[in-house]
Image: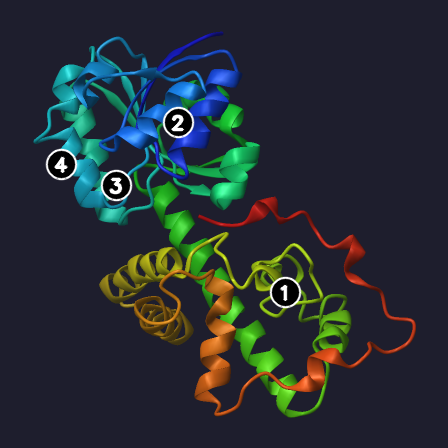
Amino acid sequence: MSRVVAFVGLGHMGGPMAANLVRAGHRVVGYDLLDELMVSAEAAGVERAASAAEAVAEADTVITMLPAGRHVLALYREQGLLAAAGPGTLFVDCSTIDVEDARAAHAAAVEAGHRALDAPVSGGVVGAEAATLTFMAGGGGPEFAEAEPLLLAMGGKAVHCGGAGAGQAAKICNNMILGVSMIAVSEAFVLAESLGLSHQALYDVASTASGQCWALSVNCPVPGPVPASPANRAYRPGFAAPLMAKDLGLAANAIRAGGVDATLGLGAAALYEAYAEGPGAHQDFSGIVEAIRDRSGHGATTANTAPPASGTPDASGTPDPNGTPA
C-alpha cells in the first residue's frame, strides 16, 4: 500500500534511501538544508519541501537521517517538527545517535501525540543505494509492524530489537565488534608482514579457519585478497573512519555509563578517534592498518607479493560487499 513519507536528511545515506521508497511506489516529500542534495533527490522522484515542517504536514510517516542526537532533538523540539505533523504520525529516526538521545526523542514524540521508532542502519552507502541495509529497530511492536514495509523497501532485513533505544543499542554493540575485529585483523596482517608471510597466504588460511570474520572476508584491510575491498581503491571510503570513530565513541559513552569492563571496546574507540583526526579523516575505516604499520616502524613489505601456498582458494568466492556498515 502506497504511503506518504516525509524524509528529512537527504545526504549520502538518506538520499538513496528516499529514492528507494519512491521506487517502491510511495510518495516521498523530502527536505535537506543543502540545495544540491535536494536537486539530486528531486531527480530521483522525491518531492521538494520548502522546510522540514512543510515536508511532514501531510505525511503518515516521518523518517529522519541526521548526523547526531542533538540534531534530532533540535528538529523535533525547537524547530517544530513534532508540532507540524498530524496527530499520531509515526516518527522513524534512522540516524545513529546515543541511546539516551534516542529515548529522549521517543519520549518527545509520544508526549506530542505521535508514535516513534529508533531504527539505525548497517550497510553503508553501498547498502543504501542497493536497498540491502539492515535496520535495527527500537520501540513498540505495532509501530515496528507499521514501519517494516518501508524499512524493507530500503533494506534487506529489519529486526525489532526491543523498546525505545534498543535499535541504537544494537547498532553500537555491532559496530564495537566490527571496530575491534578490524583492528585485530589489521594487526595480524602487519605481524604477518614482519614474519615474511604473504597477505594472500594469511587470507587463505584465516578466511577458512577460526580467524574468519567480516572485517577479513568482505572488507579486508590489505589490497589483493578481496578485490572489492576499499584497500584496492586507496582506502576510498565505503564506511569512513570518522563514522567508525563516532560509533565507537557512542559505545565508549555507554560502556562508561554502564560500568562495563570493556577494555577492547574502549581501546578501539581511542585508536579510531586518533586515526580519524589524522590520516584517516578521509579514508575507509580499514585504512587503520596503515596507522598500525606506521606505529610499528616499518612500511609495507614485499611479503604481500609472495604467491599463496599451492592448492589454496582464491578470493573469487568472497561475500558481496553490500554489507558495508554505517
Residue 148 in view (yes/no): no
Q: Position of residue 248 (x, y in %)?
A: 35, 61
Which is nearer the eye, 135 or 45?
45
Q: CA distance from mark 4 to mark 1?
A: 39 Å
Q: Nearer the viewer, mark 3 or mark 2?
A: 2
Residue at the spot of label 4: 74
Q: Amino acid at mark 1?
A: Leu
Kind of element beneath mark 3 = helix
Earlier in the chain: of badge 3 and badge 1, it is 3
Q: Residue 65: x and y, percent?
A: 32, 35
Q: Residues within 10 Å of mark 1 (few under 14, many from 20)?
A: many
Disc 2 designates what residue? 40
Q: Residues within 10 Å of mark 4 (few under 14, many from 20)?
A: few
Q: Residue at x 25, y 41 (%)?
A: 102
Upstream in the sequence, badge 3 or badge 2? 2
The Cα atoms of the two marked residues, 1 and 2, are separated by 34 Å
Q: Amino acid at mark 3?
A: Ala
Mark 3 or mark 4, whichever is nearer to me: 4
Q: Amino acid at mark 2?
A: Ser
Label whose residue precedes the other's in the sequence (3 or 4)? 4
Q: Quadrant of residue 316?
A: bottom right
Residue 216: assigned label:
1
Residue 145 figure quarter: top left
Q: Residue at x 33, y 40 (%)?
A: 95
Front disc: 4 or 2 = 2
| Disc nearest the viewer among 3 and 1 | 1
Question: Of the residues under marks 4 and 2, which one precedes in the sequence?
Answer: 2
